Image (spheres, grey):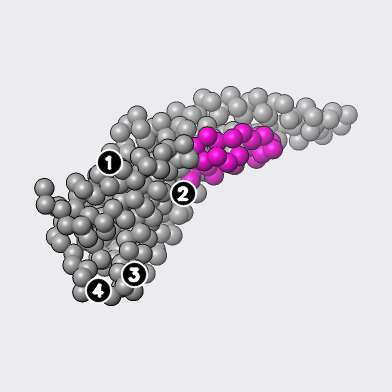
Amino acid sequence: MDVDFYNWFLVFVRVGAFLFALPFFSAMNFPATLRVALAALAALLLAPQLPPFDVRHLDLLAVFGLLTRELAIGLLFGFFARAAFFAADIGGIVISNELGLNMAAMMDPLSGQSEQVPGLILFFVATITMLSLDLHHGLLLGLARSFDVLPIGGGHLSSSLFELLVARTGRIFVLALQIAAPVMAVSFTITVFFSVMSRAVPQMNVFAESFGIRIAVGLIVFGFTLQISAQYIANSLERLPDDLLGLAQLLNGAQ
């Protein structure tokens, strides 16, 4: 198999940046050498299928700009791939605040940082959903097909690209709201109930009485709605390969 080194290296930069931002593959306990090996292997398979890109006529500054552009494209693709996981984190934060669990945190073995328990559970649900449904294969396939739409050295900013980024960022918050909505509804109902009870029985310590009930009922509802949350996350992940191609088209100047 005849492989052009420059093609291979440029593909390696884009794929490596994508894997660096992709969930699970960017985990702290995922070996960096294995991540580099996966990026190198993917580049080795993709590079022979692409037209050769001659960098010998470019000066050092132009080569640096080309590498920076491929790196930025890979990170942007990775941001799109992490959208559902960002939504899971935000949904977990909202649920923790609604249940009063924002002070309870545990160590996330994937990131090495302190995370709130509902957010950590939702992150694992999103990871298991992605891997069990083989949706990560679709992401890698979408990245491979992006080279056909956005060849090496291509890509520029545009107003359409900015609008797409804003829309996708807004979708993150919509998905987070869908995940946290059942717990938010239960928390609101409990708040209204104990507000009425405080008027009917002024001697009742509303805060002390409602705290335990809010946590117990909220966790029960959270557990029963995990399957619905996983379905929302799966629907978002299934759209990602087409989203990556749409992003590549906008980067290449298509409207």
Q: Is mark 3 in CB contact (under 8 Å) with mark 4?
A: no
Counting residues from the start of the chain, the first of labels 3 and 2 encountered is 3
Q: Which residue is mark 4?
A: 58
Residue drawn at (34%, 74%), measured in percent from left and top? 61
Q: In whole angstroms, how far apart are the C-alphas of marks 2 and 4?
A: 40 Å
Residue drawn at (42%, 35%), measured in percent from left and top? 127
In-front residue for pair 114/91: 114
Q: Amino acid at mark 2?
A: Ile
Which quadrant would residue 232 be assigned to in this image? top left
Q: Which residue is mark 2?
A: 172
Q: In whole angstroms, how far apart are the C-alphas of marks 4 and 1?
A: 35 Å
Q: Position of residue 202 (x, y in %)?
A: 86, 32
Q: Which residue is mark 1?
A: 138
Q: Which mark is drawn over residue 65? A: 3
Query: What range of the chain is rendered magenta?
Result: 86-114
Q: In whole angstroms, how far apart are the C-alphas of marks 3 and 4?
A: 10 Å
